[in-house]
Image: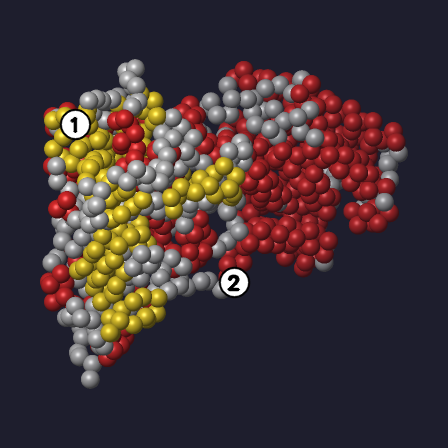
Amino acid sequence: MAPQLTEAQLVVARPYALEVDEVVRELGVRKSGLDSADAAARLALAGRNELPEPKRKPAVVRFLSHFNDTLIYILLAAAVIKAVMGDWLDFWVIMAVAIINAVIGYIQEGRAEKALAGIRGMLSAEAHARRDGGWVTVPAAELVPGDVIRLMPGDKVPADVRLFQAFQLRIDESALTGESVPSSKEVDPVHTDAGVGDRSSMAFSGTIVSAGQGRGIVTSTGTTTEIGKIQTLADEAGALATPLTRQLDDFGRVLTIVILGMAAAMLLIGRFLHQMPFDELISAAIGFAVAAIPEGLPALVTITLALGVQQMARQNAITRKLPAVEALGSVTTVCSDKTGTLTKNEMTVRRIVTPLASYEVTGLGYDPDGEIVPEADAKAGGDLTAILAVASLCNDAHIVESGPSTGSGSAPAWSLVGEPTEGALKVVAMKGRLDPGGSRRVGVIPFDSANKFMATLDEGADGSRAILVKGAPDRLLERSLTQRGAAGAEPLDLVRWGAAIDDLSAQGLRVLAAARKAVRSGSDELAVDDLQDLEFLGLWGIVDPPRPEAIDAIADCHTAGIKVKMITGDHAGTALSIGREMGLVRGEDVRVLTGADLEALSQDQLKEVVRDVDVYARTSPEHKIRIVRALQSHEEVVAMTGDGVNDAPALTRANVGIAMGIKGTEATKEAAEVVLADDNFATIRSAIAEGRRIYDNLRKSVVFLLPTNGAQSLVILVAVVFGLTLPLTSVQVLWVNMVTAVTLSLALAYEPAERGIMKRPPRKSGGPIINLQELAFILIVSFLIGGAAMGVFYGVAAGGVDVNYARTEAVLMLALGQLAYLLNCRFMTRSSLTLDVFRGNRMIWISAGALIVLQLLYTYVPVMNTLFESEPLAATSWILPIGLSIVIFFAVEILKGLFRRRR
């Protein structure tokens, strides 16, 4: 019979800070494992060790949500009225615009669900648990708090585990904490305030065992694990609207109020002042509303952004959500993870210090192309050979050629088989052209977190044998008696080595030491007790080096007025050193906030200092979200980059989440709006420039598109207010709207970037998409084009021609007027009276040709004459619209000059 359980027996607060026996007692279990009945009872109470799938809205609801827009409401209302009145052509044209917009939005949806699915996929499928007195393989989903499990190299940890046995156990937690080096695990409890990366007594769900073995008690499963908490954070972080979507929403609401107000006024004036028939008035009001609403705007924005996506993809930035393209252009702060994003995530020896000299090591990562250069005119000799021999032989890593480089050159790419630190040592030996020759390993003492060193017994080609040791400098110095001098062994200079260690550590380098001891040729055994009276050979200074291109990209971001902040799980000293090297911070008095500092700050206190701190160290996922939120409270538009699952919640919360495509986890890629295919921080700089270009082009398109609507609505409004014949029918209004939106306005999406686009500060967040000056400009242009159309209609009609003929010429005037105005809009900050207006964007001429062809079809094809009530024009009837279009072009250029001078 299963024992009676309570929920309290399934929860242990801070198990990493408790002794193992205390954890066992709180869980009510034994180290020998559970029996099947107890496991079943705990499973029924705790639930399966899985991350639950979120509830999804029905597909129909998700599709209909894309009609939730004020401008779309008016379009749908107009379509309904048209259907009631039997004007089916108008009805279907309006509905087509609304439906296409909804379909595109629906296809782009689903990022949050995929992000959570990506995190769920990181969980282990099976686990080795002790049940009923023996070891069995069980589905990881059936593990429960209190289960005893064992971990082997290559295993994915299936749950959060309090370790009670750890033999040389090291676990790769980079995806969870951002640490570039596997964490050594111990069984002793740690301080209650220890961050996730410092909880050496724990193994966390979803991380990978890189070496050693361990056993432990499951303390958390499912959503209560650290990775489960990250899912909850990602689920609750909530995505923010981009600046463009907010601006378009505000613009739509204001425009809706204006249109409805003017339509109501027009109805009242037409009815009570001119006694117009009610059905005619309704048609005129709908024509006015359709004329005033830029129904092509949603499609224009979507297509412009989609074109931007294609352009960014060519630059290795893959966009998963369209509005993120524009949002990149408004970014004011980039928060970047360090490991694998700003740095290569390939440990590299940068300095070597021997008793005789110091050496600089060139080259980056696991590529053995580099040199070891003596400092202060010293000459490399036996001292360097000796320390490189330890780097090569006291080492279990291998550097292999993994194929051609992904870069532009033809150099091969290299990869590591083994641990990063050992990889760095193997590479520096290759740079020193060390040939181990016929050396043979006789014995080994593997690295142990208690001893903090590794030793090997090696036999040279001449039969001589020596013990080679590498490890923590303090452990090797206390076991050394001498150091290798110019004439052989000399007394150990502890003061000098202490200063050298401090110097390397101050540079943010991880310091390892090397030592050796010659032994008799017949020695076959190697034990820890043999490691006494060693000869100290020197130090290595190791770092995860910055990407050179990232340094240049950060400088470019600063020039563009964009702040770059580094948020990492690494130690403060290392983070600050990398920050200085990358140009993130300058000067000596630099403040670094650690995870412990952040815990001590309230959110309000963090808001006060967040903009003044550029380096954050030892952070957790919760800290990253707090930092992003604090920046956003200052109206900052935040881009967050990262590659580990620990970055996913912050990527979701940021205005733009940017994931690394090669080294990034699936969860991070799915949470991000943008994925960098080349893992290159420099690509962000290009993506931001592209985002700025796209926003510029969107504004040009809006400034171009609105006078079309303004001119048409002005024509109808004036006719109703003064009781005149309508120069356009509602279906002709739709024709002009669609023809200009589909042809001319799209041409501006292909405009190249303006000069100095990355030398100006980011645009301010918030505010209208069209400012008052641009609104005045749009109104004046609307009067110019609308006035020309009315002049053509009433002038031609006064000559006694049929009203449909006059309307056809008025439609031509509107189309050609817009074509002339398109050339004005190519350069909003400078004059279009230049030959540049005719080159640089071939889509201008393709669009112009398409417009002329469509107008010819509208004017001369009988079926179009029937549908749109148009009539064929005489060749001479084209002269007046063409002439007035040229006048409009020069008039708008004069207007642009006046506005530029005023600005």
Camera-side residue: 626 or 343? 343
Picture coordinates of residue 138, whole percent (x, y): 32, 71
Element under disc 2: helix
**Residue on which the image places disc 1:** 489
Q: Choose top left, top right, bottom left or bottom right for residue 626.
A: top left
**Residue on which the image places disc 2:** 59
Q: Is residue 317 left or right of residue 568?
A: right
Name the quadrant of the N terminus: bottom left
Camera-side residue: 765 or 205? 205
Q: CA distance from mark 2 to mark 1?
A: 78 Å
Q: Is residue 141 left or right of residue 858?
A: left
Camera-side residue: 884 or 27? 27
How many C-alpha atoms fall within 10 Å of the one at disc 1: few (<14), some, or many (≥20)?
Answer: few
Which amino acid does the dot numbered 1 rest on? Ala
Picture coordinates of residue 361, whole percent (x, y): 34, 27
Residue 611 is at least partly visible in this image: no
Are the residues at dot 2 and dot 1 in contact (C-beta closer than 8 Å)?
A: no
Q: Residue at horizontal 35%, vertical 25%?
A: 372
Q: Is residue 686 left or right of residue 876?
A: left
Q: Residue at horizontal 61%, vertical 35%?
A: 749
Picture coordinates of residue 396, whole percent (x, y): 32, 46
